[in-house]
Amino acid sequence: MAFDLGTPVNTALLLYILYAVQRILLPSNSQSKSVPHEFKGGYSWMPKAHPPTLLFKTYTPKTLEPFNGEDGKRILLAINGIVYDVTAGRNFYGPQGMYANFAGRDASRGMAKQSFDLEMLTPLDQPLDKLDDLTPDEIENMRGWMDHFSNKYIVCGKLVENGAV
């Protein structure tokens, strides 16, 4: 089967290949004389302000409690000793959200039992919940929530007993 320049398809392909090779081997050296209008006012993709820097910190139930999202503050919650910054999910964890009772608290038992009741929360002046009475299914459920939070939100600290810091 020979290459035949008599067919229009072969001729068009040859011209295209020659043009592409010429553009690669002999690129244009001309510079644009005007600045694109998109950049005249600066870069539009830059944020108005950068978010505050998050440092990995150690929290106690009492030091975690102020981070409940009230007055526009950050929202943190803990599951099994890991503290997550869930501020990005303000609609869920903020003061009017359906998970608002977990904001600024240890949500381990509530997440494990899929319960949003206030009795799932350990009082702030009590020791951390050891979660000894959870069933294997509840522990697996809690781990699923931890995986979800680790993939979606920033891990910003660990939760320890009151007085341990």
Image: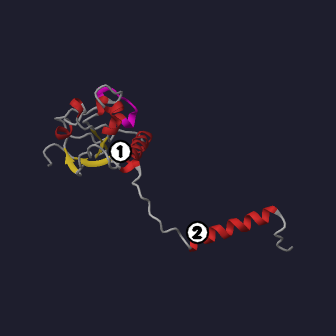
Residue at 67% over, 70% down? 18
Compare residues 133 and 140 and report the one nearer the observer.
140
**Pair 1/2: label in front:** 2
Residue 123: x %, y % from top left? 21, 32
Compare residues 117 and 83 and report the one nearer the observer.
83
Query: Left or right of 62: which side holds 16?
Result: right
Residue at 65% over, 67% down? 19
Compare residues 99 and 89 and report the one nearer the observer.
89
Which residue is situated farthest in the front direction here?
A: 33
Q: Magenta residues?
A: 111-119
Residue at 32% over, 49% down? 42
- For the N terminus, the quadrant is bottom right
Which secondary structure lies at badge 1?
Answer: loop
Residue assigned mark 1: 153
Q: Residues within 10 Å of mark 1 (few under 14, many from 20)?
A: some
Establish if 21 lies above or below 12. Answer: below
Establish if 127 lies above or below 30. Answer: above
Residue assigned mark 2: 23
Establish if 98 lies above or below 40. Answer: above
Residue 102: x %, y % from top left? 30, 33
Q: Which image quarter: residue 137?
A: top left
Residue 114 is a magenta residue = yes
Residue at 35% over, 45% down? 153
Residue 97: x %, y % from top left? 34, 27
Amino acid type at image mark 1: Tyr
Q: Which image quarter: residue 14?
A: bottom right
